[in-house]
Image (spheres, grey):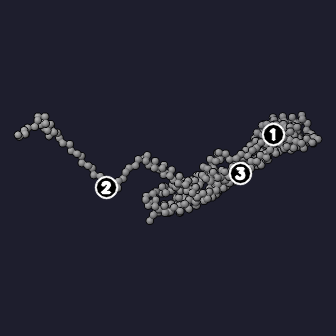
């Protein structure tokens, strides 16, 4: 029996719709690029890469510093000694200025009166001086007050108590209005001409000498600091130069693969920074140890003069100043050494 060649109506209808439907064409595959491809890097990627390399170089510099403790320690100790000398001198000047801070820096004339001068004549003379327009203030110190002050300041109370009479005269402390040298000398000459005056002392001369001595010490400290800072730079430059020579082959390889001078320079800058920080810390320890050794004798000497003065050692501000200054010197020395020697190492 023959099968019928006619399809069912539903199947024929589906076939007719499928034949009318347009066929979707597959997109042609793009050809893949061959050879080297240049990819764009974002600014954030460059920033993270730059920070990552700085972090690596800092860790590597610390590792190299502690890998040779003897050589690194000797270099840091030389830097510390060079920094400790001007720092100790500056600290001594600060303590000296603090010790004399209680002294009156204003010009003052001490007028010592005759011992046989009467009180009424002395009071009249003091009144005339107070009325003088060239005088700002007049202070009267009686012989009894002068003796008490001398006993407290000198510590010779028992010896003075054995004296039969008070050897000290009355004193007038005259503070002039004009501080010019010629006016001070003219006023002192006028006071010497008085019949009640035994001696006149211009205390401004001692103040001027003290100020000149302090200025001399300050300039000496500044000159010594500049000279020894130059010595620190030379030490760092020589040390970094030796590091560069020992890593010459490594620098050549880095430059062959495209490393820039900044890339090559970075680890040596961190090495100089390590030497500077270590030298600054050691310098602070040296100055602190010296202050601790001298604090006892200074306190004992001050106690013998009935003074509560105590030597002040280097505090946290000194630590920051020494460490920061030494770090800058180490960084500057490393930069000078690298700028001079890195460019001379080029692949051929």
Dot 1 alpha-carbon crowd within 10 angstroms: few under 14, some 14 to 19, many 20 or more? many
Q: Nearer the viewer, mark 3 or mark 1?
A: 3
Q: CA distance from mark 3 to mark 1?
A: 43 Å
Q: Quadrant of the N terminus?
A: top left
Q: Residue at x 64, y 47 (%)?
A: 319
Q: Is residue 333 visible?
A: no
Q: Residue 324's spot in the image, x, y percent? A: 60, 49
The image position of residue 228, as x and y in percent, is 64, 56
Mark 2–mark 1 distance (CA, rounded to whole Å): 100 Å
Within 10 Å of the Cα at label 2, are there few (<14), some (14-19), or many (20+) other Cα atoms?
few
Marks 2 & 1, CB-CB < 8 Å contact = no
Apparent side of residue 88 relative to residue 176 in the rendered image (left or right): left
C-alpha span from label 2 to label 3: 72 Å
Residue with the mark numbered 3 = 290
- Quadrant of the rendered image containing residue 304: top right
Q: Earlier in the sequence, mark 2 or mark 3?
A: 2
Q: Secondary structure at mark 1?
A: strand
- Which quadrant of the rendered structure holds the C terminus? bottom left
For label 2, the SS is: loop
Residue linked to disc 2: 34
Q: Residue at x 94, y 41 (%)?
A: 164
The residue wearing badge 1 is 174
Q: Residue furthest left?
A: 1
Viewer-side residue, 17 vs 142? 17
- Toward the front, the furthest residue is 1
Along the horizontal axis of the image, is 290 left or right of 243?
right
Residue 232, compared with residue 140, is above or below; it is: below
| Label 3 element class | helix
Q: Circle 3: is it few (<14), some (14-19), or many (20+) Cα within 10 Å? A: some
Dot 3 and dot 1 residues touching (CB under 8 Å): no
């Amino acid at each position: 029996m023959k099968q019928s060649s006619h399809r069912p109506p539903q199947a024929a209808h589906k076939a007719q719709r499928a034949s009318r439907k347009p066929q979707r064409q597959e997109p042609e595959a793009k050809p893949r690029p061959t050879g080297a491809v240049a990819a764009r890097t974002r600014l954030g990627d460059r920033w993270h890469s730059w920070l990552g390399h700085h972090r690596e170089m800092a860790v590597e510099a610390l590792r190299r510093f502690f890998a040779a403790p003897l050589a690194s320690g000797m270099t840091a100790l030389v830097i510390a000694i060079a920094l400790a000398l001007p720092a100790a001198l500056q600290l001594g000047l600060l303590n000296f200025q603090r010790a004399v801070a209680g002294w009156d820096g204003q010009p003052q004339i001490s007028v010592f009166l005759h011992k046989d001068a009467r009180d009424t004549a002395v009071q009249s003379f003091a009144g005339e001086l107070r009325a003088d327009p060239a005088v700002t203030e007049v202070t009267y110190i009686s012989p009894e007050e002068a003796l008490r002050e001398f006993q407290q300041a000198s510590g010779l109370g028992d010896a003075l108590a054995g004296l039969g009479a008070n050897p000290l005269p009355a004193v007038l402390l005259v503070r002039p209005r004009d501080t010019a040298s010629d006016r001070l000398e003219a006023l002192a000459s006028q006071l010497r001409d008085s019949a009640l005056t035994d001696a006149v002392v211009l205390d401004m001369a001692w103040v001027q000498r003290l100020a000149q001595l302090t200025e001399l010490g300050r300039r000496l400290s500044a000159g010594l600091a500049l000279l020894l800072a130059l010595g620190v730079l030379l030490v760092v430059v020589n040390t970094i130069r030796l590091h560069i020579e020992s890593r010459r082959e490594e620098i050549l390889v880095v430059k062959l693969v495209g490393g820039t001078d900044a890339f090559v320079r970075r680890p040596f800058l961190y090495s100089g920074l390590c030497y500077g920080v270590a030298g600054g810390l050691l310098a602070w320890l040296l100055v602190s140890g010296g202050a601790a050794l001298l604090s006892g004798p200074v306190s004992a000497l001050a106690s013998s003069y009935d003074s509560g003065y105590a030597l002040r050692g280097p505090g946290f501000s000194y630590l920051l100043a020494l460490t920061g200054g030494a770090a800058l010197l180490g960084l500057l020395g490393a930069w000078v050494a690298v700028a001079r020697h890195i460019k001379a190492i080029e692949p051929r």
